[in-house]
Image (cartoon, helix red, strand yellow):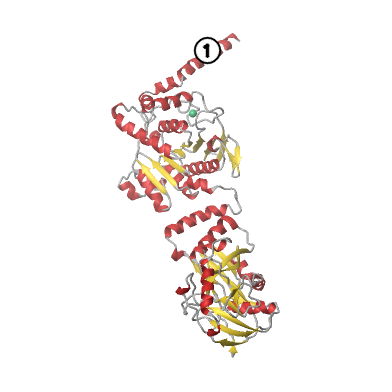
Amino acid sequence: MGKLKFHNISSAIDLSFWHILAKKKLEEMKLEDQILNINGYYSTNNNPDIAPVFRIISDSFNENAAIPSNSIRIRGLLKVFNTKEDFISSSKPPLLQKAAEQITSENLVSFILLVYADLKNFVFTYWVGFPVFNFNPVEYEELPIQEVNLQHLKVSLAEKVDQNSLKSIFGINKTGEYEENWGESDIICYLDPASSTDFPSSVLRNILGLMSQGKQFGSKKFLAIKNGLSSNPQYFTLERSKLYNIEIPETTKDFIGWEANSKGKIQAKTIDLRPQLDPHNLATSAVDLNLKLMRWRMSPELNLDILASTKCLLLGSGTLGSQLSRNLLAWGMKNITFVDSGKVSYSNPVRQSLYEFEDAKNAVPKALRAAKKLQEIYPGVQSSGYQIEIPMPGHSISSTEDHARENYLQLESLIKEHDVVFLLTDSRESRWLPTVITSALDKICLSVALGFDSFLVVRHGGCPSDDRLGCYFCNDVVAPRNSMTDRTLDQQCTVTRPGLSYMASSVAVELLVSLLQHPLRHKAKHGDSTHLGILPHHLRGSFSTFGIASYVSSAFSKCTACCVKVIDQYLNNGFEFVKMACNDPDYLEEVCELKELEANEKLLADELIEIEDFD
Ligand SMILES: [Zn+2]
């Protein structure tokens, strides 16, 4: 005879559980903080040095998940607090009581996991309550295990393991037969996760409490099964199992059971996941965090997946390309490609955020350096760079035809591979060919241009159709030509107020993000709106007024870059058409019948003069 003591069962929480919790909090729970159901698991084992534990694992959120082999499922609770202050100040006894309400003859033990998740730093503050009946020490007597027909029991247990129908508690009769209804059984058997032979675990404590609450008083025999089990009875023994004779005590519905921390104090614990995480994964999670938090309160409908999967091609990796790519990164865009024919020069680093002095010293190709720099900023990005000279009207390619053809084909295939093309080059004519190709392929295309103190951002209307919005060239009645000859130095270089590129690239990226939220994408009309606000066609901003205004213009039926005739020429004749347009911009005006328009306008003007004269 002696006083019975119990081994407490402590929690062991898998790292994978914390990862899933972080994801769920961020994406599903958001600001909700009601108590949720989760599962824990325990099992018997063969190592007497292992303290009894129940595990909370990655599957713990899944109510219907398969139970790990040889394990017993525990129904428990989870409460995730929104602030650390709430976590600390919340009244704990009612929470433990809630978990205790889960204790039944089907669920001998339960738990509640309280968590405050600092998702910014991957630190979780948590406390596990494992409620057990609180009663005065009871007398017990250990009986010789030989009283039990262990061989018979082993066969029954192996069968249950094999059928995956192992119960946490059952009975055996005098001849050792297995009995599902254990209330009247000769011996009550239960699986005990405390594998050391000195005392049982608190599973028995709760069995005694439940029997007491059910007024099943009197003296009862309990078999604590303390060995690991298998579906083959030859592969396990029950040698460390214990048989006790216990008088069922009087109990109240009074529960204790908050876990101690590593210092033995009844206090919350913390786990810092940073050391376990790969820095690249940490960066990815942290970048996603800022975006996903937008969905908590400010913009619940925000579709981040579409942003993450959109492939952006930036034609030009100078002042605009640098800033714009960083804005794309900030929005979680993960596929960014640069095209630029130039090399980093000494004037670049102060204005173009992707380059440094050393890049200028080594005259590295801009597109390649930009792609690499982006990966240095955020390794999760898929970025690449191509040194391509875009064929341009007015820039004859007769002497460099093979080179131009190669550039043309490479540009065309890049545009095909991407979803969005940004036109960010510093000359008008270099935007012509990409406008033609993106219109023909119906890609999203945004053109950004800078003046000295003003900027323009325009979204192109895509392939020719009725009611289409205009492209960058739609307001022109002449073909783009070589704008670089006969120009003074200030006319050749981008002379702009330095802040302008930041502003213009921000506006362009925000317009794209809004556009991607609309089901019609670039086909959305001017003034259509999404949960983020309206979708203008084009925007002009100026530092002389510090204002931005939105405008709309329709596609021009004789546009040199997006009209049906040009698109047909491109689709039917490909490089041959491009070659003719580059060698002779007049040819382009003929294709678009702009010459006729000019003649008609002249006629109309003459008529007007005549009418005026007549007056
Ligand atoms: Zn156009």
Question: Which residue is at 49% across, 57% downward?
Answer: 286
Q: Is mark 1 within 8 Å of ligand 1?
A: no
The image position of residue 609, as x and y in percent, is: 55, 13
Q: Is residue 441 visible?
A: yes
The image position of residue 270, as x and y in percent, is: 52, 70
* Observer-nearest of 227 and 139: 227
Image side of residue 115 versus residue 336, left or right = right
Secondary structure state at the residue bearing disc 1? helix
The image position of residue 331, as x and y in percent, is: 50, 48
Q: Is residue 133 visible?
A: no
Where is 67 relative to 155, above or below? above
Q: Specify the quadrant of the image occupied by residue 313.
A: top left
Q: Specify the quadrant of the image occupied by residue 116.
A: bottom right
* Observer-nearest of 135 and 568: 135
Quadrant of image for the C terminus: top right
Quadrant of image for the N terminus: bottom right
For this orientation, the residue located farthest to the top is: 614
Where is 258 relative to 489, above or below? below
- The amino acid pointed to by label 1 is Asp
- Residue beneath disc 1: 606
Question: Which residue is at 48% across, 25% downward?
Answer: 564
Question: Which residue is at 41% across, 46% downward?
Answer: 352
* Observer-nearest of 428 and 139: 139
* Observer-nearest of 389 and 207: 207
